[in-house]
Amino acid sequence: MTIARSFLTLCLATGLLGSCSHADTKEVVTEEPAADLPYDAVQVTAAQPTRSLSLPGELDSYYQTDIYPRVSSYLKRLHADIGDAVRPGQLLAELEAPELTAALSEALSQLKASQASYSSSRAAYHRLLVTSRTAGAVSPLNLEQAHAKALSDSLLVTAGRAHYEAASQMAGYLRITAPFAGVVTERNLAPGAFVGPGGQTNLPIFKIRQLSRLRLRLAVPEAYVGSIHVHDTVRFMVRTFPSETFMGTINRVANSVRPETRSEQIEIDIPNPKNRLRPGMFATATVPVDAAKSSLFVPRSSVVSTAERTYVIRVKNNRAELVDVQKGDETMGQIQVFGPLKVGDVVLKAGNEEITNEEPLRVELAER
C-alpha cells in the first residue's frame, strides 16, 4: 500500500513538471512599430573666405604658329628641324615651283622692254621739244604726238614694275622664313612633298613656339571675378620642379564670364629666359583675392544640384523649404553658398531630391 502511494505521488509530480515546462515555452512575441528616424541637420555658419585661390592652369607659348606654304609647290630643301632654335627671318625651307620662276623672268623682261621703249620715246620728245623752239621747224601736231607716246610708255613702265613686283612677291613665297624667335617643335614633311593650297596634305611644314616668354591661363570662378586686379602677383608651381615657386603678374583679364564654366579667363605673362618651363606644363597657381566680408558655409553634402536648379533644404517650422543658392569656394568639406540664407538657419546635412517643398520633417542637429 505504501509502495503504491509513493508511485502515484511520483507520477503526479512528473506530470506537473512536464506541464510547467510546456507552459514556459509558449512566449508571445509582439513587434512595436518603428518610429520615423529624424534627419540630420546643421546650422548655416559664417566664416571669412580664403584670401587666395588655388587654381589649375596650363602654360602656353606667348607666340606660336603653324608654318604653311602660300603657293602650290614642291618642298625642295629643309634648313631646320625639330628642336632647332630659330631667329626672326631665318630661312627654314626652300620650295620649288618652275611656273613661278618663269613668271618672274617674264615680268622682268616686260619691265626692261617697257623701260627701253620709254627711254627712246622720252628722248625723241625732248629732241622735238628743243627743235620746236625754232619757228616752223616742228609742227605742233608732231610735238603733241611725241609727248603722248612718251607718256604712254611711262605708264607701261609703271604697269610693268607692278607686275614684276607681284611676280617677285609670289616667287618670294618659295623661301619660308621664321616669323619670330622660337623653337621648332614639329617638322611634318620631307623634301619632295607636294605642298600648298592644292597639296595632298593639310599638315604644316613646321610648328614654332616661343619659349623665352610664356602665358599662364587661369579660369577664375564667377564668385571671385570682382576680386581680380591687373598687376596682382601670382605664384605657381609645376610638377617638374616641385620644390620651386615661380612668379608672374596678371597682365590681361577677359572681362567676360564664360556661360559654360561660369568663370573668367585671366592671363599671366611668364619670363622664361633659361627655357626651363615648357609650353603644355600644368601649373597650380595661387591667386590673391579680396575678402571684404564673411561668407556663408554649409556642408558640401547639403547642396542639391539638378539639371534645373541648385538648392539647399532649409527646415522652418518643421517643414522643408527649398532655397536656391549659388556655389562658391570649397574648403575642408564645407562649401561657400550665396542665396537668401542667414547665419543660424537650419538646413539638412544631406540634401535629398525626393524631399518636396513644405514637406513635414523631423530633424536633429548633428555635428558638421
Image (cartoon, rainbow, N blue to C red):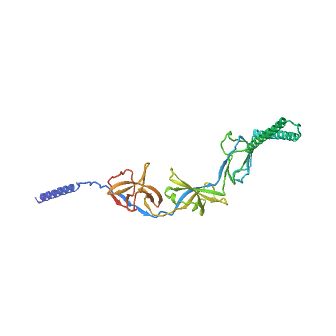
Rendered residue at 65%/57% (across/down) = 213
In the rendered view, does 39 fall on the left or right side of 76? left
In the rendered view, does 52 fall on the left or right side of 149? left
Of residue 92 and residue 292, the one placed in the foreground of this image is 292
Counting every numbered tag in the picture gives 0
Residue 157 in picture, x, y percent from top left: 79, 41
Of residue 292 and residue 149, the one placed in the foreground of this image is 149
Question: Can you tell which quarter of the image residue 231 is in?
Answer: bottom right
| Residue found at the very far left of the displayed protein | 1
- Give the quarter of the figure containing the C terminus: bottom left
Of residue 298 and residue 173, the one placed in the foreground of this image is 173
* Residue 66 seen in this snapshot: yes
Question: Can you tell which quarter of the image residue 111 is in?
Answer: top right
- Give the quarter of the figure containing the N terminus: bottom left
Of residue 62 and residue 84, the one placed in the foreground of this image is 62
Residue 106 in picture, x, y percent from top left: 79, 38
Question: Can you tell which quarter of the image residue 286 is in?
Answer: bottom right
80 lies above or below 42: above
In the rendered view, does 45 fall on the left or right side of 129? left
* Residue 234 seen in this snapshot: no
Residue 340 in picture, x, y percent from top left: 40, 57
Residue 71 in picture, x, y percent from top left: 71, 41
| Residue found at the very far front of the displayed protein | 135
In the rendered view, does 296 fall on the left or right side of 214? left
